[in-house]
Image (spheres, rainbow, N blue to C red):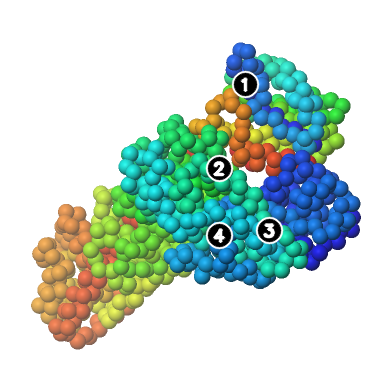
Amino acid sequence: MEGLTLSEAEQRYYCDLFSYCDTESTKKVASNGRVLELFRAAQLPADVVMQIMELCGATRLGYFGRSQFYIALKLVAVAQSGLPLRVESLNTVKDLPLPRFVVSKNEQESRHTASYASDADNPASYSGVIPPPPGRVQAKKGSVSHDAVQQRTSTDQESTSPVVSPQQSPPTSPHTWRKHNRHPSGGNNERPLAGPGPFWAPFSEAQPGSSAAGDPIWSGHSPPPHQENWVSFADTPPTSTLLAMHPASVQDQTTVRTVASATTANEIRRQSSSYDDPWKITDEQRQYYVNQFKTIQPDLNGFIPGSAAKEFFTKSKLPILELSHIWELSDFDKDGALTLDEFCAAFHLVVARKNGYDLPEKLPESLMPKLIDLEDSAVVPVVSEVGDQAGEVGYSSSPAEAPPSKSPSMPSLNQTWPELNQSSEDTAIVHPVPIRMTPSKIHMQEMELKRTGSDHTNPTSPLLVKPADLSEENKISSSVKFVPGNTVADGYSSSDSYTSDPEQIGSTVTRQRSHSGTSPDNTAPPPPPPRPHPSHSRSSSLDMNRSFTVTPGQQQAGVVAYPPAVPPRPQPSQGTGPHVHRPVDAEGLIAHTSTSPQQIPEQPNFADFSQFEAFAASGVNEEEEDEIETHPDVLQAEKPSDSASSLRAAKTEGRVEDKAATSVPNNTGKGTTPLAPPPKPIRRRLKSEDELRPEVEEHTQKTGVIAAVLASQPSIPRSVGKDKKAIQASIRRNKETNTVLARLNSELQQQLKDVLEERISLEVQLEQLRPFSHL
Amino acid sequence: MERIALLSPVCSPHLQNYPLYIRSVPTENELKFHYTVHTSLDVVDEKISAMGKALVDQRELYLGLLYPTEDYKVYGYVTNSKVKFVMVVDSSNTALRDNEIRSMFRKLHNSYTDIMCNPFYNPGDCIHSRAFDNMVTSMMMQVC
């Protein structure tokens, strides 16, 4: 390219702009995106822009290299100063002011900044940090302003203003525009209470609410001073008169004109616009919007059809073109209807426009439909589900991967999500995929919701993707579409969901870590295929129960690979197991276990039992008899708990009373049953009775049996005592808890699988419904 | 250099195929391209009628190269509602493959449907949507 000499300030400025535009850091800028925005912000006629592009050679190259970019910027400056565009002018024009780029959003800010200019000194700071002007800002807005700075930086990154980049150090002096900016900002600090009134009137019958709503809109003042700081980087600009934000003055006038239609109160309000993020909706505003939404659509989770929305917003007397643009911005999923969030965004934009703010080119982040409206009744699970689609299904999830084609369509499926209390569904066993799930925002929020309700954080990743229906449904329905940007890759804490679920499900079992079926062993391989819901899925619920009881017991026995988190129960007398074992029991156990589909854990039991059987056969008959009496349903006692201890007790001491005592809890409601037909009556009893008890008892007994087998010790003398009874009782309780938890776990897993399947099917449907694939 | 023209469906008997949107880069000789687009309508109609009815497959939506002239090539695309897209590209721009043209039309179509979803847009109005403009501009920039 032709040699281009840039002054130091220009060099800096252009470099900053180039970095700003060079979003991909490829050292060349495609001739679209930010560059276009930049040129548009230069407020030059389109043909001039074209001419510039041609001159700098970008048209030829197809992109802007650094030199092309610089030349283009210089030409912009040339054009803005009214000089004819010529290549020669690049180097011949001396003292060319820096190109000016207008930021649509900033015009208000600049105006306000101007108003503050008197207080503001232009910090001659070239530092990239935007100096917060706390002093300048109203007290209440001081903090906001600081945030605004950050946010403005971020938002402006999206907007057309490259000046926003914090590294910008273009020299600006707000002086020139200070003057004429000052006047509109007469009432900076006034709360625009009256303002909203006339504006809101057409929208609502209730006037008072509107004023309250209108006020908060303008609470944030901060940006103006910040703008000023941004803009006014140097007090002594190398090129004297130029302001990076000079366009603000131009905008000012135009804005003032456009604002002329607004009331004076609106004008005042303008200045106090919420800049921390100009587009942030305050709570009062939101409440107002929600109320307005209700007048049109009573169901907060429903949609407002386009026609109704059109009527509503037409009342604002904005030109149709602008309303059309507002619609384009706010109808995020492009479905022709407005959800609550979309409606609030649209309403907010209308209000902003009414008050003189230019509409942004893109929907500001704060107005984007949220993932979950925790505070609102309408939960909008917009999730970066596109990433989830791929992610959750495959359990990988990078939320931000949403294909752009899907992102705009997201909120179309905004629905109210049912409360987190799931309707438990019995579903087929699902694959035990350990779902360390997508840390999508919706997940996280739901997790948090659940977390608040749970008193136990059990970070068990494999088991908990989301306990539930709600989250899964949310993900599924909203999944296909949403905004990637909203996903938050939070660490996924599955335990939360788990813990809350049991609570939701109504588990009253005290959760003890040791009992948790969802062990804290996050990295453990998934437990054996989740069993169907024990309480209702099978007629042979006994089996399920048994399996449940087996598993935890086995855990404790350490026999199987089941989540070993549970600290191994003291198995004092492994050897006593055999005593517990009765041939009949073994049979029963084997019969039961054989019917249960699951279990890997079962297998060892099975094997164990055979050994056990042999053992028992050769074992002490009298002991057995004792045990038989006391533990009629000792079919499977993995835990060396009650049964074991009781056995031991019986064994060592031959104390029937101990056995009786221990057996009492076991036989709660059962009474001692003669061993004679132990399996059958036991089975019957178990089936008929509350499953938990038999589970527990079976479990305990089985555990004991297993333990005994493992230990393979005929007898271990045990000290007997009351404390033993207490220990046994506590062990029993623990086992019960464990069982319940295990069952809950399986239920949750099933629910999870159901939801995932639903999600997949919905995604498939969605794909089918999309006639055109997005590019 | 290319132009993009959006033409309306033949909805009103007296207003046939008026353009809803015309955009060209660069902007000189615009009239010439208006003319080109208008004349290409005949070819589009020809192709539509040749296809027969009930052809809503997307493949048929894309009409392909309508006809090449000495300077440029004209591509056509018609939506299910008979809204026609006509794209004129410079013949010297040989980098444009058919797939790219298809994708561009697809994008146009998507943006057009988004516009239609806007209740403030009355079908038949000229298109003033900024989003649409941006999309078209970016698309054209990619090509130019």
Say which mark, if any, is on residue A244.
3
* Chain letter of the residue beneath label 2 in the structure image: A
In this rendering, the answer to whether A596 lies above or below B135 is below
* Chain letter of the residue beneath label 3 in the structure image: A
Does the CB distance between marks 1 and 2 fall below 8 Å?
A: no
Residue that label 4 marks: A115
Residue that label 2 marks: A258
How many angstroms separate mark 1 from mark 2 (CA)?
A: 36 Å
Answer few, some or many: residues within 10 Å of disc 2's Cα (few below 14, many 20 plus, some between 14 and 19). Answer: some
Q: Amino acid at mark 4?
A: Ser
Report helix, strand or loop for mark 3.
loop
**Is residue A478 at all visible to an observer of this figure?**
no
Answer few, some or many: residues within 10 Å of disc 3's Cα (few below 14, many 20 plus, some between 14 and 19). Answer: many
Residue that label 1 marks: B9
Answer few, some or many: residues within 10 Å of disc 4's Cα (few below 14, many 20 plus, some between 14 and 19). Answer: many
Please name which of the two marks, 1 or 2, marks the residue nearer to the observer.
2
Q: Horizontal and vertical percent for residue A68?
A: 81, 53
Question: Which residue is found at the position 70% from the left and 63% from the top?
Answer: A170
Q: Amino acid at mark 1?
A: Pro
How many angstroms separate mark 1 from mark 4 (CA)?
A: 52 Å
How many angstroms separate mark 2 from mark 4 (CA)?
A: 19 Å
* Chain letter of the residue beneath label 1 in the structure image: B
Q: Amino acid at mark 3?
A: Ala
Q: Does mark 2 fall on the same chain as mark 1? A: no
Q: Does mark 1 fall on the same chain as mark 3? A: no
Question: Along the line of sight, which residue is nearer the eye, A190 or A618?
Answer: A190
